[in-house]
Image (cartoon, helix red, strand yellow):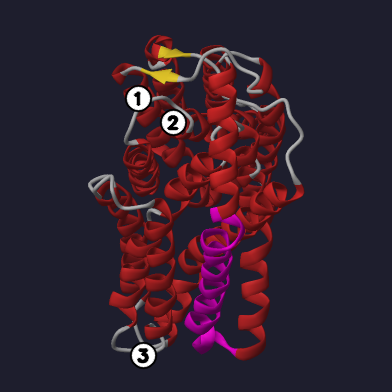
Amino acid sequence: MIATAERVHLTRAALVAIGAVFFLMGILASAYGPLLGYLSHRFGISLAIAGGTLSAHLLGALVGVLVSMRALQSVASRSFMLGALSLLGLGCVGVALAPSWGAFLGAVLVIGVGFGALDIGCNQLVAHSAGAGRTAVLNVLNGAFGFGAVAGPLLVSTVGRTHLSLLYGGAAAVAVGVLPLVAGISGRLPFTAQRTPARSNALVGIFMVAFALYVGIETGTGGWMPSHLESIGLQSLAAATLTSGFWLALAVGRLLAGFLPARVPEPTTVIVGTAVAALALLVALNHAAAPVAYIVAGLAIAPIFPTGIVWLAKLRPGDARATSWLFPASMVGGAIIPGGIGAVIARFGIAWAPAVLSLVAVGCLVAFSIAARGIGGRIGKGSTALVRGDRERQ
């Protein structure tokens, strides 16, 4: 039995709103790093203490995701989005007006909660919405997040460091501005009221591992790429520019994935992308090929996150709870995997960074392959049959 009366429907205006939200989230997520020096000076704190901004945002985001996993089961999709957007806007207003470091940190925490709620909410609503082309749409929307992440540091360097209130006040205005468009969202996410079999839970577990490793590839490559490129002789400016190119490739790759024919299965896109990334990162061991190899890796991994969400949503079409677990798994992966990569690199040297990153990609590839060839195929058929049977009984 599916515990919902109406499937999620998204108008074009609602999709525009979600795209704008993703872009705004990309800006906010990427702005903290370039702002740390300014925050240290403004509030008279050390750079290390200013770095607590990142921790506050991540903690808030994790809280937002965990609370939203339950809220989405009982709250209408439109109401959920209105609440999450309002929370994000409130946090931005708090940052813009913060008179002290404590107030600033508290406002960042509120932004994080809204950020986490919107992250899981926007992705879930699109992945489980009615209509064809969900994979392409979700890739394009996540591409908007990537472009926002590219724009964030540019906005900080041109406006944020001298007019922080203007930057975050503008972000709050965007959040408020898209609220009317959210009215185009209707229905609720589907949640099954039945107990799921152990094999189905194992499928979700495999996807959680794969997503955690994926985030490790993304953040690990973006984090260690500059140091590796400098170690092979590139100037700091060139290494930083190429790293920006990696993130830009991630954004462009998701837009390009939106043009993939609908007949291309989600498992194929995910597995081929992961395999190409693993190979490209291994090629980055070659000094001459490293700059291009990193960009290729960015293009290859681009569709993995959004396409993987839709893949699992199709395997478990009657239960949005399955895909909701991918978001805390991704956050845990983002917190743990890069640290593990750093420990290995510290042991063997920065020269081996591409090999370590490639190994993480291989682990991700293995997990996705198990989902596609083993448990995934059987669960997908079983889940589809279950939902079909429920519809016939209704």
Task: Say which residue appears at 22% left-offset and 46% top-offset.
Answer: 259
Q: What residue type is labelled 2?
A: Val
Q: What stretch is highlighted in magenta?
A: 349-377
Check contact, mark 2 vs mark 1: CB within 8 A.
Answer: yes
Task: Say which residue appears at 59% left-offset and 30% top-offset.
Answer: 117
* Cα gap from disc 3 to disc 2, whole angstroms: 40 Å
**Which residue is identified by label 1?**
15
Circle on res. 286:
3
* Cα gap from disc 3 to disc 1, whole angstroms: 42 Å
State the image coordinates of residue 107 (x, y, percent, origin top left): 63, 29
State the image coordinates of residue 196 (x, y, percent, origin top left): 73, 39
Compare residues 170 and 87 and report the one nearer the observer: 87
Residue 94 visible in this rendered orientation of the protein: no
Q: What residue type is labelled 1?
A: Leu
Circle on res. 126:
2
Compare residues 79 and 188 and report the one nearer the observer: 188
Mark count: 3
Which quarter shows the C terminus?
top right
State the image coordinates of residue 56 (x, y, percent, origin top left): 68, 41
Crowd rating for badge 3 (residues with CA inside 10 Å; few <14, some 14–19, many 20+): few
Which quarter shows the N terminus?
top right
State the image coordinates of residue 277 (x, y, percent, origin top left): 40, 71
